[in-house]
Image (tube, helix red, strand yellow):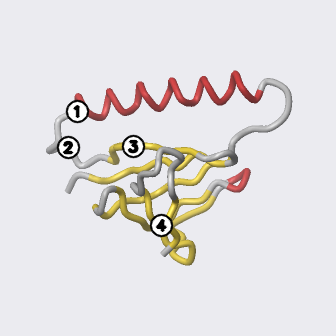
Amino acid sequence: MYKFVVGCLTERINYQRDSVLGSGSSGNTVYTGAYDGNSCAVKRVLKPSGPGRAIEIENVRREMDIWLKLCDALDNSLPIVRWIGYEEDEDFWYYVAITNS
């Protein structure tokens, strides 16, 4: 299992690089993983490069904060995918999702 260590010296996201649940365009991949020790899916998304990179990165951070607040407000009994956290490094965002069952 690959351990992703966040810059603030916490180890919250772990994922198995050989356990791909799905992949999409632009190098985005979803893995089986764990977040704070709980089973989850981890979506690794390549950050943009080039002109406008800083603005796009800030926009995605704001969007994820909104999604996290929305998921917190939802009824836990609904069978949906919930975003529960995200972390980032220099090149990627790591989105964490679980399903209610």
How far is the residue under mark 1 from the one under mark 2? 8 Å
Residue 17's disc is: none
Q: Earlier in the sequence, mark 4 or mark 1?
A: 4
- Secondary element type, mark 3: strand
Q: Residue furthest left?
A: 77
- Secondary element type, mark 4: strand
Read off the residue under disc 4: 15
Please determine whether, in this image, residue 10 is positioned above or below residue 19: above
- The x and y percentages for residue 51 are 85, 26
- The x and y percentages for residue 75 are 17, 36
Residue 85's disc is: 3
- The x and y percentages for residue 88 are 56, 44
Amino acid marked by disc 4? Tyr
Amino acid marked by disc 3? Gly
Q: How packed is label 4: few (under 14 Cα within 10 Å), some, or many (20 or more)?
A: many
Q: Earlier in the sequence, mark 3 or mark 4?
A: 4
How far is the residue under mark 3 from the one under mark 4? 14 Å
Amino acid marked by disc 1? Leu
* CB contact under 8 Å: marks 1 and 2: yes
Read off the residue under disc 2: 78
Q: Residue at x 54, y 70 (%)?
A: 20
- In-image side of 51 versus 99 (left or right): right
Residue 74's disc is: 1
